[in-house]
Amino acid sequence: MVTPYEGDFKKSIVDMVKAGRRPDELATEYGPSADSIRNWVKKYAPVDVNGELVSANELKKLRKELAILKEENEILKRAAVLLAKH
């Protein structure tokens, strides 16, 4: 069974890794696998986007939002063309 961990717990583990602790020792001490901890580090690691640091998770959300906005923009452009014809 997969044990869900709270976001705050994950972030605190990631902070400990960034401070120099090893994922395998944290796994032994706190319970999640070392692979899970490594995945959390990747997930919460900041990514440089146009000079601004954004977490990989936030970047994923922003890309999804951008795709939705582009689709809505296309729909509005088509509607404008149809309305201009009438």
Image (spheres, rainbow, N blue to C red):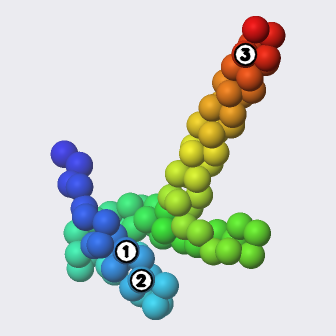
Please name the amino acid that badge 2 sits on.
Asp
- Looking at the rendered image, the disc whose residue lies closer to the viewer, 3 or 2, is 3
Q: Quadrant of the C terminus?
A: top right
Residue assigned mark 2? 15
User: Is 75 situated left or right of 56 in this image?
Assistant: right
User: Can you name the residue that lies furthest to the front here?
Assistant: 86
Q: Quadrant of the N terminus?
A: top left
First along the sequence among labels 1 and 3: 1
Which percent across, then down, holds residue 70?
A: 68, 37
User: Residue 83 — which label?
Assistant: 3
The one of 39 and 58 positioned closer to us in this rendering: 58
Name which residue type carries label 1.
Answer: Lys
* CB within 8 Å, label 1 to label 2: yes
Q: Which numbered marker is on residue 11? A: 1
Q: Quadrant of residue 27?
A: bottom left
Query: Is residue 22 something that shows in the picture?
Result: no
**SS category of the residue bearing label 2:** helix
Image position of 32 with respect to 53: above or below: above
Q: Tags 3 and 2 in contact by the CB under 8 Å rule?
A: no
